[in-house]
Image (tube, rainbow, N blue to C red):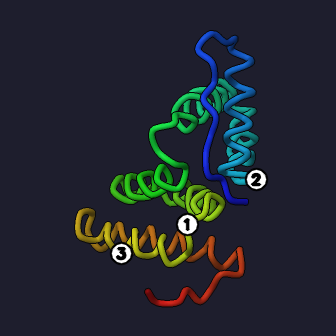
């Protein structure tokens, strides 16, 4: 699944419309992994699931200023920098692949993060990516 652009939602919408728009964007970017996150939240914090969907994807990810692949590169870098976000990194590595980044580009971005985030966080992020690559039959990753 390759996504090259998202569609901005008109300003005046209902809460339900914002959620539905976000769900569409989430599905195109994160696919099943995003749906699994929402399902995991349904019995503990359905409001957080709503906000992730309506605001995070319906408002932020749908903005026209960056292509989805660029948003995923930024997201991978930030999650790596934060540390302790390996479950979210796995979701976003999947998303990065869905929007057209190659395993080599993802590995290069995570290698680059070592300069700014340190080796432990870059290693953790790379191992999270490796798990996704293995699940998707993308190992070994060819060197750049």
Give the image quarter of residue 73: bottom left
Tell me the quarter of the image containing the N terminus: bottom right
Question: In this rendering, which labeled residue sits more in front, label 3 or label 1?
Answer: 1
Q: Residue at x 68, y 14 (%)?
A: 15
In what element is the residue under mark 1?
A: loop
The residue wearing badge 2 is: 32
Res 112 label: none
Provide the secondary structure element on which disc 3 rests.
Answer: helix
Q: How crowded is mark 3: few (under 14 residues within 10 Å), some or many (20 or more)?
A: some
The relative height of residue 44 versus residue 123 in the rendered view (above or below) is: above
The answer to which quarter of the image holds residue 44 is: top right
Task: Indicate the quadrant containing the C terminus: top left, top right, bottom left or bottom right.
Answer: bottom left
Residue at mark 3: 111
Whether residue 52 sits left or right of residue 73 in the image: it is right
Which residue appears at 61% of the width and 65% of the height?
A: 97
Q: Which of marks 2 and 3 is nearer the N terminus?
A: 2
Closest to the observer, 142 or 51: 142
Snapshot quadrant of residue 119: bottom left
Q: Which of 24 and 45 is in front in this view?
A: 24
Residue 84 image point, x, y percent: 43, 56
Q: Residue shown at 32%/66% (left/top)? A: 113
């Amino acid at each position: 699944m390759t996504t090259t652009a998202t569609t901005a939602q008109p300003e005046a919408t209902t809460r339900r419309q914002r959620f539905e728009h976000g769900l569409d964007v989430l599905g195109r970017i994160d696919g099943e992994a995003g749906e699994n996150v929402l399902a995991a939240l349904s019995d503990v914090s359905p409001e957080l699931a709503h906000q992730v969907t309506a605001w995070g994807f319906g408002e932020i990810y749908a903005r026209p200023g960056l292509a989805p692949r660029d948003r995923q590169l930024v997201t991978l870098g930030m999650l790596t920098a934060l540390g302790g976000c390996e479950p979210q990194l796995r979701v976003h590595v999947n998303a990065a692949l869905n929007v057209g980044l190659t395993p080599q580009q993802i590995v290069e971005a995570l290698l680059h993060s070592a300069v700014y985030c340190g080796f432990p966080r870059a290693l953790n992020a790379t191992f999270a990516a490796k798990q996704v690559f293995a699940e998707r039959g993308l190992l070994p990753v060819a060197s750049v």
